[in-house]
Amino acid sequence: MDTKPQPFVPPHPIPRTTPPSVIELIRTVVRNPVEIWGENCYTKPHVTATFMGERTLVANHPELVRHVLVDNPANFRMARMRQLILRPILRDGLISAEGEVWRRTRKVIAPVFTPRHIKGFADMMHSRIGEFLERYRTSTGEVHDISIDMTDLTYEVLSVTLFSDEIASDGFDFANDVNRLLSTMGRVDPMDMLKAPGWVPRFQRLRGRKVLRKFDGVVDDTIEMRRRKMAENPDAVNDDFLTLLLQREGPDGLSAQEIADNLITFIGAGHETTARALGWTLYLLANSPHDRALIEEEIDRVLAGNPPPVEWLELMPKTRAAFEEAMRLYPPAPSLNREAIEAETFTFKDGTVLEIEEGTTTLVIPWVLHRHREYWDNPDGFVPARFWPENRDRIGRFQYLPFGIGPRICVGATFSMQEGVIALAMLMREFRFEATPGLEPRPIQKLTMQAEHGLPMRVISR
């Protein structure tokens, strides 16, 4: 008899069955955008709606997703609402830049994230995560907010791999400062939805200006510190991400402001994908003892052979699968927002025709797509086995997009996967993470998908 337990179904908003009023819609988007999606978004190949005269298309069908993000991205620029949120924080950093600025930036940054370079980071990741474990070794049995801890951990890895531990961080409470930045600057303001002119104050973002200035100060000081070192002793300067950016300053590379924008992008947001995915993975496994036991067995068996960290990603498919399944349920980037530049007609393979009007806000929403009833069995359940090697071919290329897809796919996707598996292996080899009584984390969208009140969990030795 099969004794495998039923999959754990973690907290998630219940899809709407009736359309919201205008006021309710605005309130919901400001409060938590993932709560606005109705049941039809989780069952239909595409959904269209009109709000205040603006047409919106939710694209779920794999053919339509491919068309918007891969085959014809030139006709789908970044949506205005997305840019209103991102650009005040990241300006012309890689995530929010467009057009020629984006192309130049991507060309400059891409060499750092080639497979060869990323594999070269594995030992540094291993060493820094090992140092982080002292936090738990000296406090066994205590409750920690894992969401904060994983932010601290991924920041430390980012610092050592991309910046040679030379971020000017005096007085910088990284995890809390990031949380304040995303809770204020990283959320929709009612004035955005009402299409108010740019000069109308966005009170939601006014609250975040102080912490944004703090990030700007960290970036400016970090650049100045590295410029001084490059001038005084160039042989002592590491060939890292920061050095690469500064070496490419000039007419054919990046401007000084674009360099600063990319530093704030990577320091402020470069850790987020891995941090959130790690936190959710540990929470989900805490509530799935059967899957946790399988992963602990895999980690113990593999590490008993003492392979180099660079090989762990390939040697631990079950650990990787849990990480990927966490990103399915709680995608770090829950929506990919585009806007049609010109009207066009899209024809599906079955002959169905879809008219996309000029200016249509076109949304590919991983939060919805990853839970779509047509593409996933048990879509709301935590089922890591769906990502085991023998099952992966059942997952369509355009139904799972934790890092996006197409020209703007996350440049750090492989970096994040390698870091995530190394971190999980080291954390779970020594410790077990237990959900505290009554923990029902409400997922809330603040650029990334976060637990509203954190993830307080008890950390015990195995």
Image (cartoon, helix red, strand yellow):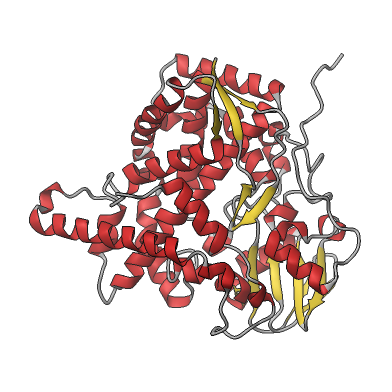
Determine if residue 461 is in view: yes
Residue that appears at 18% across and 60% down: 227
* Quadrant housing residue 334: bottom right
Classify the position of the N terminus by image quarter.
top right
Residue that appears at 42% across and 48% down: 174
Residue that appears at 63% across and 70% down: 189
Q: Position of residue 266 (x, y in %)?
A: 41, 56
In the image, is residue 412 above or below residue 341? above
Q: Residue 279 versus residue 68: which sits nearer the camera?
A: 279
Classify the position of the C terminus by image quarter.
top right
Q: Position of residue 425 (x, y in %)?
A: 50, 26
In the image, is residue 114 above or below residue 50? above
The extreme right residue here reads 18
Q: Residue 458 versus residue 210: which sits nearer the camera?
A: 210
Q: In the picture provided, is 112 more to the left or to the right than 79?
A: left
In the image, is residue 156 above or below residue 334? above
Looking at the image, how many numbered discs can be counted on the residues? 0
Q: Residue 320 versus residue 426: which sits nearer the camera?
A: 426
Q: In the picture provided, is 83 more to the left or to the right than 111?
A: right
Determine if residue 64 is in view: no
* Quadrant housing residue 190: bottom right
Q: Position of residue 333 (x, y in %)?
A: 60, 55
Q: Position of residue 133 (x, y in %)?
A: 42, 26
In the image, is residue 262 above or below residue 396? below
